[in-house]
Image (cartoon, rainbow, N blue to C red):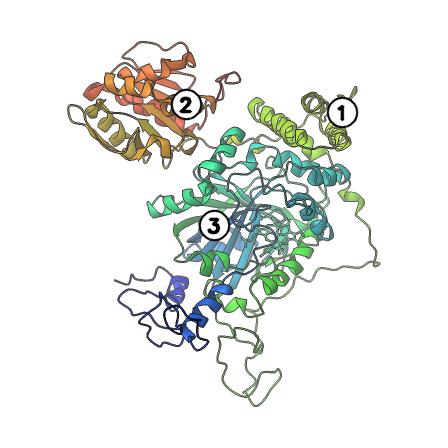
Amino acid sequence: MAQEPRDDKDRQLGDFRVSDDDTLLTTQQGVRVDHTDDSLTVGERGPTLLEDFHFREKLTHFDHERIPERVVHARGTGAYGHFQPYDDWLAEYTMADFLRDPTKRTPVFVRFSTVAGSRGSADTVRDVRGFATKFYTDAGNYDLVGNNMPVFFIHDGIKFPDFVHAVKPEPHNEIPQAQSAHDTLWDFVSLQPETMHMMMWLMSDRALPRSYRMMQGFGVHTFRLVNADGRGTFVKFHWKPLLGTHSLVWDETQKIAGKDPDYNRRDLWDAIEAGQYPEYELGVQLVDEADEFAFDFDLLDPTKIIPEEQVPVRPVGRMVLDRNPDNFFAETEQIAFHTANVVPGIDFTNDPLLQARNFSYLDTQLIRLGGPNFAQLPVNRPVAEVHNNQRDGYGQLRINQGKTSYHKNTLGGGCPAIADGSAFSHYAEKVEGHKIRKRSESFKDYYSQATLFWNSMSEVEAEHIVAAFRFELGKVEHKQIRARVVEHLNHVDHDLAVRVAKGIGVPPPADESTPNHGRSSPALSQLNAPMDRADTRRVAVLAAAGVDGPGTRRLVEALDRHGVVAEVLAPVDGELPGADGGISADRALNTMASVLYDAVVVASGPDSAATLARDGYAVHFVTEAYKHAKPVAAFGSGMELLRTGEIIERLADSTEVVDDRGVITTTAEGEALPDDFVARLTDRLARHRAWERATESVPA
Ligand code: HDE
C-alpha cells in the first residue's frame, strides 16, 4: 500500500516512482511482450532478423546503460532525510529560512563518497570522504558540498586537474586503484607545499572512518551569510555526528576492502533500514566582516581552519537521515551537486578554490548527465517552483505552454516576471584591482597549521600518522621524492620528520627547519569528541554446539536493549544444540571476519569453547579483534578461546566482571551472567577502542 509522503520532496518523487508489481512485460512503447528469451530467427538455427524490434530495443538500451562516472567522488552512497533548526538565533545573520525557522523541516539528500577511486572501488581506502548535502528549501535548492576534512590540498582551482591527475591511478598502466601510496601523488605533494596541512589530515585516522554515521563534515571554504538588512558575516559550516567521530585502523581497512568492499555503503543502508537513523548537528563559526584580518592566516585560504578554541562552533540544527533511495542509479548516481546552488541568505567569498568550484560543478554535470536538463531529474528537482525561459535540449521533460520564451515580453503577460525582494541578490562586495596571476602573500604559510594539527594529536593518533607516512612513502619508488617530503615534514615538526625518515630509509634531518610553535587545538583530536554512544555498534558472539543457551540469550537480549546489533557466529549457521536449550547462529564464521564487527564475545559452554579453540577461524577472529584494540569479551568456559595461542595474558578467574585493557571476562554463565558484563562491554564500545593495549607483537 502506498505510504503517506513524508514531505514535499517525497510527494514529488512519488510522481516518478514505478512499481512493476502485478504488471505485464512490455516494450518501451507499451506493446506487450510474450517472449523475451529467444530472438526472432529464420528457423531454429538460422540468422537473427532485423525486424525483431523487441530484441533490438532491449540490446540498444543495454548498450547505452552506462554514463561517465564522476571524475572525482565516483564511489558513493546516499540517503534522504530532513534538517530542522533548533531555534531562530541565526536570523540575526541570515535570511535563509531553513536555517533560522525552527518550525521548518527541510527535506535533504546526502551523498557520501570517497574521492580517488572509481565507482566500483572499495569503501575503506585511505582517502578524503565527501559529505554533500542538498537542501530542498522553499526558496530553491541549497547544496553544501563538503568533505570530512576541514581543509583542502590546494589554494587555487586551477591546480585541481594537476592534483587529481597525480592522485588518480597512474596513466600508463592505471595502477594503483583508489590508493594515494604511489609516486605521482607524492611527487606532486613534495613540489606543492601548500598540501602539507591536508596531508596531515589524510595520513591521520580521519581518512579511515568507521562509518559515514560517525564522521564529521565541513564546508571547508569560508562562506558568507547575509541577513535581511544585507549585512554579511563570514561563516564556516560544520557537521558533527551524534554517534561520535570514530575511525578504523589501517590493517583493518585493508582487510575490509577485500572482505566487504561495500562496508561503509552497507553500514549506512543497514542502519537506516533498521530504523537507527544517523543524526548530525549543523554548527557554524561566525566571523564579523570587521574581523576579516584579525587572524594570523587568511580567511580565504582553504588550507586553513579557524581553530574552534578561537571561534566556537555554535549549534544551528539537526539533520536526520531516515530513508534509503529506491533506485541507486536514478537517485544516488544522478544527483548533481553544485557549490553555486545557493539561496537568499548564503553567499560566496573570494576563496579561489570556491570560485573555481562554482564553475566546475555545473560544467561536469553536462558531460555526466548528458545535457542541460539534468535539473529536471527527479532527485535534482527543487520543491520550489521553477519558471524561466530556458528551453529545449536533450531530455527536455517540461511542456512549456505559450508562445513566449524570452524576456521582456508582452505576449506572455510579461511572465515569468522579475521577482521582488524574495529574489537572490548577490552580496555587493566592493572589489578593485589589476588583472594578475599571483598567489596572495597571505596564503604563503604552508606549515603552521600542519604543526597545530600534529601538536593536537593524542599519542596513538600521532603514532598512526607516522605509520601512515611510512607506509605511503615506503611505496614510493623514487627515493628523492621520499626525501623531499621528509624535508617538508621537518618544517611541520622535527620529531615527526625523524620518525618518518627512519622508517623509509631516508637520512633523518639533523636539525629542525622551523621551530615548533607549540600551539594545539584539542578539538582536532578525535579522542576528544563525545564517546557516550554504543548503540548501532556490531558485536559478534562466537558459539558452537553445546553453547550456554540461557547465558547467550541473556547477553544478546541485553545488548539489544542497548541498541547494539549482536550476531551469533558459529562454524555453521542455523540451530545450535546447547545446554538448557540452544540458540540459532545468524551466520557462519567463515563468511564473516572480526574486521566487520566492533567487538567480539565468546559464549560459554565447554563443548562450544573446545570446538572453537580447534577452529582456526575462531582463533584468528579473537586474535585479530584483540590486535585492532577492540573490546574482546568472554564468559564462563568461553574464556578458553582467549587462552588459546596465549595472545591474551593475565585472564583473571573471577565471577566478578574484570575489564583489563578492554578484555572483559567473568567466569559466571547462564542466568547468572551479571548485568555488569554487558554494561562494561557497552561502555567499551562507546569508547570505541582500548588504545592502552599494547598490540605491536600480536600477529593477525
Ligand atoms: Fe569537488 N568536484 N572540486 N571538492 N567535490 C566534484 O562534481 C572540484 C572540492 C566534493 O556526491 C565534481 O558532480 C574542483 C572541495 C564532493 O556528487 C567536480 C575543486 C571539496 C563531491 C568537482 C574541488 C569538494 C565533489 C565531480 C577545486 C570539499 C561529490 C562530480 C577547485 C569542500 C559530490 C561532480 C557528489 C565532486 C570539482 C574541490 C567536495 C568535477 C574543480 C574543496 C563532496 O565538479
Secondary structure at badge 3 equals: strand
Please, what is the three-letter code of the amino acid marked with disc 2?
His
Could you give the CA–CA distance between mark 2 and mark 3, rounded to whole angstroms? 31 Å
Residues 390 and 19: in front is 19
Is 564 placed left or right of 377 in the picture? left
**Which one is earlier in the sequence, the residue at label 1 or at label 3?**
3
Upstream in sequence: badge 2 or badge 3 = 3
Label 1 close to label 3 by CB (< 8 Å):
no
Q: Is residue 179 above or below residue 490?
A: below
363 vs 401: above or below: above
Q: Quadrant of the N terminus?
A: bottom left
Q: Is mark 3 within 8 Å of ligand 1?
A: no
For this rendering, which residue is in front, 57 or 22? 57
Please give the name of the residue rendered at 62% of the width and 84% of the height, measured from the top-left corner.
408
Q: Quadrant of residue 293?
A: top right
Secondary structure state at the residue bearing disc 1: loop
Q: Position of residue 521 (x, y in %)?
A: 61, 31
Amino acid type, callout 3: Thr
* Mark 2 vs mark 1, CA separation in Å: 45 Å
| Residue for badge 2 | 620
**Label 3: few (<14), some (14–19) or many (≥20) C-alpha neighbours in 10 Å:** many
